[in-house]
Image (cartoon, grey):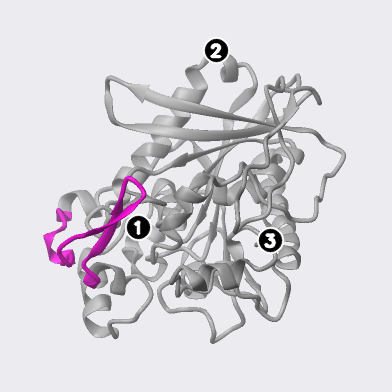
Amino acid sequence: MKPIAFFLASLALSLGSSATALHAAEPVGVQKISVVTQDYPRPLAVTVWYPSSGDGQPAAPGSDKVFQPSSANTGATVREGRFPLILMSHGSGSRAEGMAWIGVELAKAGYIVAAPNHPGTTSGDSTPAATPKIWERAQDMSVLITALSTNKRWQSSIDQNRVGILGFSLGGSTALELAGARPDLDGFIRYCDEHPPGALDCSWFRGGRGYADGAFVKVEPFDMREIDRKLFEQSNHDPRITAVVAVDPGLGTLMKPESVAKVEVPVTVINLGSKGKVPLAVEAEQLSKDLPRATFHRVENSDHYSFLPVCQPGAAAFLRSLGEDDPICEETARPRGKIHEELSRLIVAAFEHDLKRGN
């Protein structure tokens, strides 16, 4: 849940990043859309990747000094047919474009993939007070399903009976909440009280810093006791979600057990890192045992940052020169591209089994 790489908003993030293509021959289109309604107070900037007819123009690569671009065509027509819909929810302090590498792979595999930038927890627009409001993120996703299902451009291409969600870190919490799990506020307060100031996620609340309009701002340290308990612990279950993949889900160990036991949809849980090396904040093996229909995978020799896009040569040194102390581009024992290949296989296989074939 720790916010990462806020300054990337000013580095012209590209529409994607590279992983070795699993479905290289399948053309992918990409489009930016906005979801703005009178009934919902949070305008959503959304990126959609989709199976295309092979037309359109390659997306401009941009000038990203950190992440490598990948290929997807803008202005492409949607391939004929109906496709399952997969929503993607990014981690705290990241953004939809940071998940483009897996969005492209899922589109190649025959899915329409939609990812919003969650206001208040997106790169360049993030504060400690907004971070634990996971109910707002869940509502973003429910609003997005409705918007796509009623939009003339997308409704004829989406199989509304097959809707899944892929979430990373805080996005994994979002996915679990949409499946019916509910967080325990007392458990989270206890977790932050009992763990050292440098612990993943809690240090953000104590830090007295935030980001607005792409710039650093000073804010008061945030006390989780100020959270509205009713909103924090409410059910955000959306019965339209029929399959979940949660990668390093934040708060995974702090969901109310009775709610976890009632999750009916299949959930694939993935931890990044060898056993004993995954931060407690996102350790999810026990969660997978508590979920009625869960499959657990551990990606060895990786870490929490391995889910981010493949980095440009020299990006790690560039980040250090800017004072970034998170290991965003530091390599683990395996190249990030190889880790992405494994993740792509696991994620695509999970949705093929749980979403395309039905559950």
* Residue sitting at x 29%, y 85%: 196
| Quadrant housing residue 66 | bottom right
**Residue under label 1:** 259
**In the image, which residues are magenta?**
206-229
| Quadrant housing residue 127 | bottom left
Q: Is residue 26 above or below residue 258?
A: above
Kind of residue indicated by mark 1: Ser
Asked if the residue at tag 2 contacts the one at tag 1, i.e. Cβ–Cβ closer than 8 Å, the answer is no
**Residue under label 3:** 343
Left or right, 82 with respect to 327, comes to right
Label 2, secondary structure: give it. Answer: helix
Kind of residue indicated by mark 3: Leu
Q: x and y percent of residue 295 in the render?
A: 61, 63
Q: Is residue 218 magenta?
A: yes
**Residue under label 2:** 152
Task: Count residues near mark 1 (Cα–Cα under 10 Å), then give few for <14, some for 14-19, many for 20+.
Answer: some
Kind of residue indicated by mark 2: Lys
Q: x and y percent of residue 143 in the render?
A: 39, 31
